Amino acid sequence: MMAMQAQRGALRDPVFQSFSLLRLGFTVAPILFGIDKFFNFMVDWPEYLAPWLNDIVPGTAQQFMYAVGVVEIAAGLVVAVAPWFGGYLVAAWLGGIIVNLLTLDAPEHYDIALRDFGLLLGALTLARLASVFRGGSVKVDDRRDLQEAA
């Protein structure tokens, strides 16, 4: 009975809700973007590959995007099962995307790079929050620290 009350309390906790929203977003978005790398429905993804990067990777830009799609799907799945690691993985991936965008027809894609920087910060926030909720339960000391900081 006490465990159910604690679980219901966690569902009402804004910190847990924030963690859950970030986890959902950073699971679903990379998977959907990864799938789209195979179909180019949202955008023609090879156009977003910096020429210097296209020159050093084997194959065509579209073939590289297939590999990117696989990595993004995998990153979304990692966030779903291990957000304390997946958040850092997605943040690193977004860092790579930002470098690519900053070196692709500067300054044409700076707005997208800035958006991805915001997403990178969100992914880092997810990883930090996940360390508090790791293992399905909140560490008492970590939770107390969060309450004091709020």
Image (cartoon, helix red, strand yellow):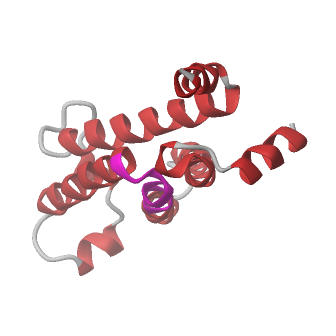
Provide residue 29's location: percent of width, then percent of height.
37, 37
> Is 78 situated above or below 41?
below
Point 47% across, 39% down: residue:
23
Q: Where is residue 99 in the image (x, y as percent from the top left)?
A: 50, 66
Q: Which of 126 and 7 is in front in this view?
A: 7
Does 83 sit above or below residue 28? below
Q: Give the dominant element type of the magenta stretch: helix, strand or loop.
A: helix
Pick the front one: 114 or 88: 88
Using the image, determine if residue 3 lies above or below residue 107.
Answer: above
| Closer to the camera in the image, 28 or 14 | 14
From the viewer's perspective, tell me whether residue 99 is left or right of residue 114.
Answer: left
Residue furthest front as drawn: 1
Q: Is residue 87 magenta?
A: yes
The residue depicted at 88 percent of the width and 43 percent of the height is 149
105 vs 52, left or right, is right
The stretch in magenta equals 81-90
Q: Quadrant of residue 41?
A: top left
Q: Residue 119: horizontal and vertical position, in percent?
A: 55, 45
**Residue shown at 48% from the left, 64% from the top:** 92
> Hey, which quadrant is residue 28 in on the image?
top left
Measuring 54% from the left and 28% from the top, which residue is drawn there?
A: 3
Residue 52 placement: quadrant: bottom left
Point out the residue furthest to the bottom here: 56
Residue 118 shown in magenta: no
Quadrant into which the C terminus falls: top right
